[in-house]
Image (cartoon, rainbow, N blue to C red):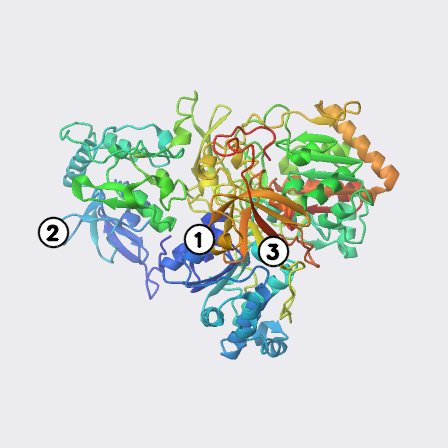
Amino acid sequence: MSNPLADMDKPDVIFCIGTNMTECHPVAATRLKKALARGAKMIVADPRRIGLAEIADVHLPLRVGSDVSLLLAMAHVIAREGLVDQAFIDERTTQGEDFMQHVAQYTPEWAAEICECDPADIEKAALLYGGADRGAIYYTVGITEHICGVDNVQSLCNLALMTGNLGREGTGVNPMRGQNNIQGAGDAGALPNNYPGFQTVTDPAHQEKFHRAYGRKVDLETGMTKVTALDLCGDGIHAMIIDGENTLVTDPDRHHCEHALKSLDCLVVIDIFMTDTAKVADVVFPATAWAETDGVCTNTERRVQRLRAAVPPPGEAEPDWWILSQLARRMGWQGFDFGSAKEVFNELCALSPLYNGLDWDRIDRGEYQWPVPTRDHPGTPRLHEERFENGRGIFKMLEYRDPEETISDEYPMWLTTGRRLPQYHTRTQTGRSDGIDYLLSEETLEVHPEDIVRLGLEDGGWAEMSNPRGCLHVKVRATTKSPKGTVFASFAFEDVPVNVLTGGGYDPVTQTAALKACPVALKPVGPPPALGQVGAGSPLGASVL
Amino acid sequence: MKQNGSPSKNGTALTLTLDGERVTFSRGETLYEVAERHGREIPTLCYDPRLEPFGGCRLCVVELEGARNPVASCTMEAQPGMRVRTRTAALEVQRRILMEMVASENRDTDVDPMHGYASQEMAELLDRYDARTGRFEGALSGTSRPDDDNPFIKRDYENCISCYRCVRVCAEQEGDYAISVMNRGFHTQITTEFGGSLKDSACTFCGQCIQTCPTGALGDLKALANKDVPGETETTRTICPYCGVGCSVDIMTRGEKIVGILPGMDGPANEGSLCVKGQFAFDFVGHPDRLSTPFVRDEASGELRPASWDEALDFAAGKLRKVVKDYGRRAVYGIASGRAPHEAAYMMQRFIRAGLGTNHIDNCSRA
């Protein structure tokens, strides 16, 4: 996030797009509700009538994957009505004039043809955000998990740049990170293009720095992404080490993933459970879990916080860092003699300009948000206050693109996926926690009542959902939460593995999978024969993911 | 969170007199906040620093010069020149009688601390005011809801004192408005829309009502299930393992067992809030399905079988070395986790970069 969580109750106008915050980041959503109680207005753009939409002033139920068209039209209205912050544009951005000319063609009526929103609502939303003194944008993977994920994010940046909604309290462009340390994994350098602290691997100065630190020269070219690596399994990639990821279940196109991992000569998995991914490994190492591990995590607002062990791990489980450093030593490599998590973290701090001012002891109370470049630096709750790190903010001239796969006569419905409040990801943790299944014990496919009639389905009955990649059976639930033409399911339950269907392309820049827009066919089927064994109270064996 | 303003418009310090002592305060502070800040322990049962002042329990009354009756310090904004007394004999008598009356409506005056964060507040005040006299014993107010079969929140309203903290935390802190009040006076009943179970209401089971309840009328059923686990309860501050908000939690343990979770009231990201997962979804940690030993794929049977660390590490290193020998160092790929700590991700990239000299490393953020 460009701004701290504490800023979330401060905007005049909140614009949430592609974020089901009350279910996926519930505690952050409480701050937005406080802003609303104080009188702030809220725009929610989401295909579904999610919890946030229920309390919004404007809900834009856009068609999945059409975000760029909607955002271009909002920029059009803001420019047309003169709601731009010209001083901000002049002082801190480039290509503002070109951008205003670019968006002149993209009227709300043009966008309505694509995003299927009412042009009057697009107009209203644009006037609200454009007219705000403090306008704040919040988004999640509903923005990024598209073939145009980068374009979506840059469209949001364009809106913030043209209205000067950056670098001030209660403003910003704020991605909500979905996992407890997904920010930290990037911070720590687990990226093919960046060393720790987002130092590019293609810069010879960075290469030299890490050569000195590690005693070995690292390739000057960017590594491949995980997506490419999975494509090349058995054909260039012959060994993988996977830590704490149930790749087979969470990644798009399960059959492709299964084939990829099985064609490796060596798969090493580190995890806390025997996941489906672990089951196909050559070696499985048992890791310590949360509450058993000392360490550090970074949250969505770049706050660096300590994790502390409270109980001993089961049996011989060990921390991930210990497992990997021991494996490195068995490989015969020097320099992996770490004795504690503290030593590991302090090495990271020494090598990352974002963490140079930090160490294990300094983050004890969690008051620092990176960058913290020096020991006397107070941390950076709000980015871009005086200037942008890379000079001027650049307007991007974007065009709308269709998703790689679009609906057809054969596959006439959009499937979009996500999470639900009580269950997390593939239920490896929440599914094994007493009581959670009381709140949600099975997956259902959310279908608009008119679609139920049109497709010959039945509320509470079963449907076969298919596309060329796969097929699954799922119980149907009639709800106007889904718009006509779009159905929704979470990927939490093993008996509804929606990721056998997803996988229609990737963003060309980030290779993020297009998990949010997937054409499918639906037809009624009978209930599964094993019905009765699924649901509340079902025993959770090792087969549960 | 309430915002305190500047000392005054012209920068001079604002002062009032507290028990004869001249003290400074900021514009917007209440008398209760000023007194707390200066070390006065004013009793209260309806106060939660995260919520708007309510003035319901009348325990926090103070004497204010010029006012005919004692005033509730939690709702009275501090003004320059005020002369306030927080602990006179008359106030203490009034507070004691109030405590005797409050306790008289409840079935239990002592509840297990596993009920929740604030659950001991009433018992502590009864002790402080030596108010377990039973002078006003009579009917109990509030009707418990043992029919609500939810596994998280005990609804034992026979121990309710109608402080409305649960109602207010649900509305003001969570914005959920799932809990409401029915009837008045002695017949006041905390309830939900249509009086049904919490599952049928707007409740999200965040547990905030449990944690603010000062009497144990609401209780954490998962923690209470562990109330007989032997040992002292210890707490360990850490961060919730689920989404990226980074809420502070205090893990309660007895011996080697996690017995419950308390929200970190001073957590910078959450300021005491949690959701159903952070509050209740912790049993995966000690679950019997946890891996407790390494496994290697048996060459003969093709099945995974338990192995020692020595064997498993050698087995993995041997296989990796063979891949490097057969296909080169660029044939090995590392995927770090967004769920494990920094040290895990850092060591994975160090393994790939310092060990193999490549950048074939990623994390799980692309899917």
Q: Residue at x 45, y 41 (%)?
A: B276
Judging by the rendered image, the residue that carries numbered circle 2 is B68
Q: Is residue A157 left or right of residue B212?
A: right
Residue type, numbered disc 2: Arg
SS type, badge 1: helix
Q: Position of residue A363 (x, y in %)?
A: 55, 44
> Quadrant location of residue A383?
bottom right
Dot 2: within a 10 Å radius of its alpha carbon, few (fewer than 14), some, or many (20 or more) residues?
Answer: few
Q: Residue at x 59, y 28 (%)?
A: B290
SS type, badge 2: loop
Residue B30 in sight here: yes
Q: Nearer the viewer, mark 2 or mark 1?
A: 1
Q: Residue at x 40, y 63 (%)?
A: A40
Residue type, numbered disc 1: Gly
Q: Nearer the viewer, residue A428 or A167?
A: A428
**Disc sitting over residue A517 in the figure:** 3
Q: Is residue A434 left or right of residue A242?
A: left
Judging by the rendered image, the residue that carries numbered circle 1 is A51
Marks 2/1: CA–CA distance:
49 Å
> Quadrant location of residue B192?
top left
Identify whether A46 is placed above or below A27: below
SS type, badge 3: loop
Residue type, numbered disc 3: Ala
Q: Nearer the viewer, mark 1 or mark 3?
A: 3
